[in-house]
Image (spheres, grey):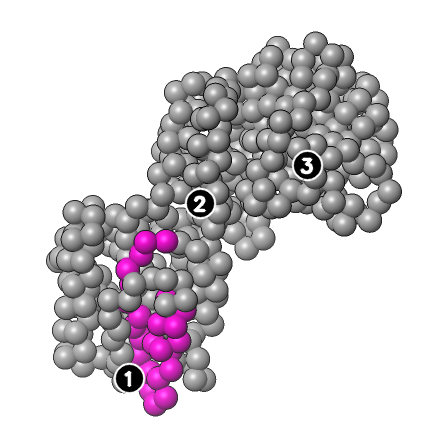
Amino acid sequence: MEKVFRAVKVTDRVYWVGVIDWVLRNFHGYTTHEGSTYNAYLILADKVTLIDTVKAPFKDEMMARVASVIDPRKIDYIVSNHSEMDHSGSLPWMVEQVRPEKVFASVMGAKTLKELFHWDVEVVPVKTGDTLDLGYMKLSFIETRMLHWPDSMFSYLEEEGVLFSQDAFAMHLASSEIFADELGRDLLEREAATYYANILLPYSPLILKLLKQVNEMGLKPKVVATDHGPIWRRGEDIAWILGLYEKWALQKPTGKAVVVYDTMWGSTDLMAKTLADGLASGGALVKLMPLGGSHRSDVAAEILDAGALLVGSPTLNNNVFPSVADILTYLKGLRPQNLIGVAFGSYGWSGESVKQVREVLDAMKVEVVGEVKSKYVPTKEVLQECFQLGFQVAQKLEEICGGV
Ligand code: FEO
């Protein structure tokens, strides 16, 4: 059955031909409460050019949107800004369908596409500063290695001022409004921050370098066309999201403390709540996140603007609780910076969990302020220790950053 979907005009010569994934709730382990989009763009120049493709199961939807403005067989070039499967999954199929004259990717992208698809399609490698003549317009390229894959790059259509930024400045948000100015700032900030925390956080030093590079190049895009979520087309919105990226990449500590824990019979829960009380009494802003009801990607988002991370776990079979092992593995990979912390937890007889939590916090370069353990149910003395430790963390946060 031929599908009917429309393209959306972005500028005079650029159309959005992406797809909306309303039902996505799991993006490789990141909970996407609001679904997502996989954005692709069509440039109507002498050389008709498709920027990126979409996740494979959505290929017909993308094709229908292309067909709503042009015969897809008129596509001359395909540019792959990022090889990850949500943007390249339907590339082999698209190449087969439209037989473009050329496919372009960054140097690493050309290599990655070959390794992903084991195909013999020739991909033309492009480097930072290379340009591609599309007739009366041209595309230029900026490699953005490790943002967030080695192959990642930006493409810039100077004549229309459109920066195709792949995953950068993106968010997982399914919406029939495809422009950021049609949506509220609170929603945009929450979803962009969650995306940054879960996808880009480990590469924050590179983000700072890239922002500097873009500035030095004098690049002033009128439109930032991302690969997920809404398109930024107002100058004030572009400046706002760039400013947020700088803030998130710097990871300056704040007076906010995130308490993450799980519990077996309520002892670690009671310790967590008492630590939270001590934190609040000391002036910290507290976010308590029991892992029974908090997803790892939401925890990551909360940590993005925090100054302290307190992690609690009961001991189970000589180990940390499985949910705590999960969050610690995830957070360690995301490499948050500039945090102080606490390890805490309850146990029955062996009690290894607190030491194990502490070891991971040390490996993450979290400055551990203290630890507290409880044998079985916490006594009044242990709870006083928890309160005091929470208070001490809040005071240290105050010293570091002057409070919230
Ligand atoms: Fe949206 Fe890194 O793929």
Q: If you read the primary sequence from the N terminus, does the residue marked by circle 2 or circle 3 appear first? A: 3
Q: Tell me the kind of residue under disc 2.
A: Pro
- Residue at 44%, 45% in the rendered image: 205
Please state the horizontal and vertical placement of residue 304, each as a whole percent of the image: 37, 48
Q: If you read the primary sequence from the N terminus, does the residue marked by circle 1 or circle 3 appear first? A: 3
10 Å neighbourhood of mark 2: few (<14), some, or many (≥20)?
few
10 Å neighbourhood of mark 1: few (<14), some, or many (≥20)?
some
- Residue at 43%, 65% in the rendered image: 328
Measured Cα–Cα span from mark 2 to mark 1 = 43 Å
Dot 1 corresponds to which residue?
A: 376
Determine whether the residue tagged by mark 1 lies in a helix, strand or loop: loop
On whether residue 230 falls in the magenta region, the answer is no
Q: How many marks?
A: 3
Measured Cα–Cα span from mark 1 to mark 3 = 57 Å
Q: Nearer the viewer, mark 2 or mark 1?
A: 2
Dot 2 corresponds to which residue?
A: 205
- Residue at 48%, 47% in the rendered image: 203
Could you tell whether 33 is left or right of 283 in the image? right
Q: If you read the primary sequence from the N terminus, does the residue marked by circle 2 or circle 1 appear first? A: 2
Q: Which residues are magenta?
A: 337-361
Label of residue 106 in the image: 3
The answer to whether residue 139 shows anywhere in this view is yes
Please state the horizontal and vertical placement of residue 36, each as a whole percent of the image: 56, 39
Determine whether the residue tagged by mark 3 lies in a helix, strand or loop: strand
